[in-house]
Amino acid sequence: MKSINLEEKHGLFSKQWHPHQIATVDDMQVILAKIQGEFVWHAHEEEDELFQVLKGTLYMKFRDRTEVVNEGEIIVVPKGVEHCPSTKEGEEVYLLLFEKQNTAHTGDVAHEMTQTHYPKI
Amino acid sequence: MKSINLEEKHGLFSKQWHPHQIATVDDMQVILAKIQGEFVWHAHEEEDELFQVLKGTLYMKFRDRTEVVNEGEIIVVPKGVEHCPSTKEGEEVYLLLFEKQNTAHTGDVAHEMTQTHYPKI
C-alpha cells in the first residue's frame, strides 16, 4: 500500500522489449516496458491488453491499419486481434501495460524477443 | 481499437466523485474520476483497486496512516483494506482507476455519495 512512482520505476531498467512487473490487481498485472523499433506480430487469444503511453508515440499496427497512440493516451487491444507494437525510428517509447498475469508476451508465437519472465521491480 | 485521450475524456464531465467508464479489459474496467475533499470510508471485500494520479495529489487515508500519491504515481489498495480517498482543501484531483467491473463504488457502505452507475464516455 505504497505509492509507486512510474518514472522512478522506469529508471530501474534499460533493456528494451523486456517488461517489468510493478504491481498486481486481482489476477491482472501492471507492467512497464521500454520499446523501440518493431516487435513481433502476435495475438492473445484469451486476454485483452491495455497499453498506456507514458513517453513518446506508440504505433500500434493492426493487419489493416496503424493506430497512433500518443503520450497521455491508452489503447485496448481486444483478445484475438493480431497486433504489432512499434515506434518511429530512433524513438524510445515508455509504456505501462495492464493485462492478465498469465498473458504470454508474444501470444502463441515463439520468437527470440519473447520473454517468459517479467522481473518484479 | 482507437486511442483514448485521457485529458480529452476528463474534459467531458465535471461532477466530482462521479466515475465515468472509458474502457474495459477482460472483466476489469478503466474509469476516470475528479475528486475534491474527502470521500467515504469503505473497503472492497473481494477486489483490489488501482488508483493512478493524473493531476494533483491524492491523499489515500488508511486507518493507521495516510499515503501521499503524487501525479505520475499509482497505488493499489488490496481487497478488504479500509480506505478513504481525499485531497487537500481546494484542490481538484484527476484519477484513473483500474478495478473489476462489478466493484461497488463504496463497498458495502451505502452513502449519499455512492454511485451505482458509471456512465460510459
Image (cartoon, coloured by chain):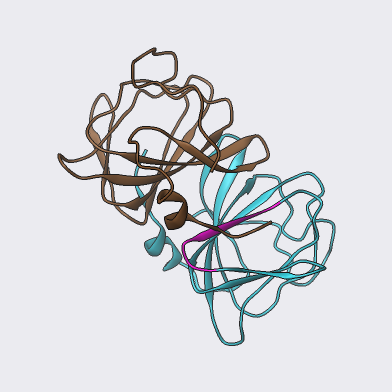
Chain colours: A cyan, B brown
Residue in the image at 67% along x and 51% along y: A49
Q: Would you say the magenta stretch is mainly helix, strand or loop?
A: strand
Task: Residue A92: give x, y in percent of width and height.
Answer: 53, 78
Looking at the rendered image, the quarter that the N terminus of chain A falls into is: top left
Q: Nearer the viewer, residue B10 or A2?
A: B10
Q: Residue furthest bottom?
A: A90
Up-down: is B59 above or below B101? below
Residue A86 is situated, as x and y percent measured from the top left of the image, at 66, 74
Report whether B109 appears left or right of A114.
left
The residue lying at 71 percent from left, 49 percent from top is A103
- Whether residue B110 sits left or right of residue A108 in the image: it is left
Residue A74 belongs to the span the image colors magenta:
yes
* Quarter of the view holding residue A37: bottom right
In the rendered structure, the answer to whether residue A38 lies left or right of residue A21 reads right
Relative image position of residue B43 (x, y in whole percent): 41, 21
Q: Is residue B99 above or below residue B11?
A: above
Residue positioned 47% across, 51% down in the render:
B9
What residue span does the magenta drawing correspond to?
A: A70-77
User: Does the magenta segment cover residue B50?
Assistant: no
Q: Is residue B38 above or below residue B92?
A: above
Q: Position of residue B21 (x, y in %)?
A: 53, 39
Residue B91: name its quadrant: top left
